[in-house]
Image: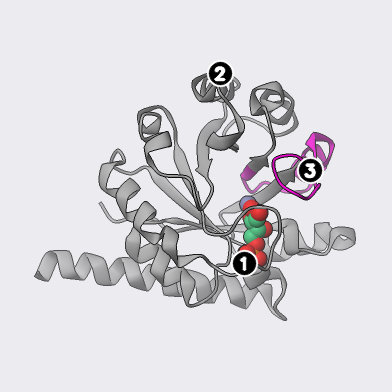
Amino acid sequence: MQRRIKLAASILAANPVRLEEDIKKVEMAGIDLIHIDVMDGHFVPNITMGPFFVEGIKRITQVPLDMHLMIEHPERYVNVFADAAGEGDLITFHIEATKKPGEVVSLIKSAGLKASVSLNPDTPTGLVEDLLDTIDMVLVMSVNPGFAGQRFISEILPKIARLRSIAPEGMDIEVDGGITTETISQAVRQGANVIVAASAIFKTNDPCNAIKTLRQIAEQVVREECHHRING
Ligand code: DX5
Ligand code: ZN
């Protein structure tokens, strides 16, 4: 089965006082997901958006939300984020942030949302491999979480390849951090299909064009792979 590329626009690099305008732009460009970076000042050295904010975003867009919880003890907050968003939206939590990953997955699922687990650049895939059958997506961080605009850590690429080789057929593998027109092909070549970008979309003059270009590059990699598989 050919992997379907999905692009997620991280609003961490959008203009916070013109957010609605920025969201409309990426919506019109056919973005697949709005990626919301939730940071608590404990798990990561930055503080950003909470459930109140998610609720506001939900009111201005139909695009599915991709909530990236960079918070300690996600089991305490999953329900409030699930209520702020809605069925079919996605919640990602960090494996490093909880002792009860199975419980977090169940809470997300019973609220009717999709569940995903993330690993920091230094975290081995072994910590999430047992969960793969119970989740919808795995998020491989390609920067240390906390800020937009960092450099892509290419040492994480083998982790994407490993997860793709053992993941159930059709499972989404997301990559987040330092995505550019160069690094996107490296990530897709290893098996990623959900690509998060903040700076590469919002810090350009033309977010619509940036999305189009990123999508074209990623889809080209998938087509080449398909071609290789058929022609050897
Ligand atoms: C980092 C966040 C990312 C970030 C990506 O902690 O999880 O989603 O916004 O920003 P760029 O694409 O600029 O690296
Ligand atoms: Zn993120």
- Residue to which mark 3 is pinned: 41
The number of discs equals 3
Task: State left or right for residue 117 relative to residue 49.
Answer: left
Q: Position of residue 202 (x, y in %)?
A: 71, 69
* Label 3 – label 2 distance at C-alpha: 28 Å
Mark 2 vs mark 1, CA separation in Å: 32 Å
Q: Which numbered disc, 2 or 1, marks the residue closer to the eye? A: 2
Please say if 205 is above or below 80: below
Name the residue beneath numbered marker 1. 29
Is 204 placed above or below 128 here?
Answer: below
Q: Which one is closest to the eye, mark 3 or mark 1?
A: 3
| Amino acid at the residue labelled 3 | Gly
Q: Is residue 122 left or right of residue 60?
A: left
Mark 2 or mark 1: whose residue is earlier in sequence:
1
Residue 196's mark?
A: none
Q: Crowdedness of circle 2 by 10 Å Cα count: few (<14), some, many (20+)?
A: few
- Residue drawn at (49%, 21%), measured in percent from left and top? 102
Residue stretch rendered in magenta on the structure: 42-67
Q: Nearer the viewer, residue 73 or 176?
A: 73
Residue type at the position of mark 1:
Ala
Does the beta carbon at disc 2 come under 8 Å from ligand 2?
no
Indicate the quadrant where residue 38 lies. Answer: top right
Task: Name the element at disc 1.
Answer: loop
Name the residue tied to disc 2.
110
Task: Decide which of tag 3 and tag 2 comes sooner along the chain.
Answer: 3
Residue drawn at point x = 67 percent, y = 73 percent: 207
Label 3: which secondary element: loop
65 relative to 114, above or below: below
Of pointers 3 and 1, the one earlier in the residue sequence: 1
Q: Position of residue 111 (x, y in %)?
A: 60, 21
Of the residues tagged 3 and 2, which is closer to the observer? 3
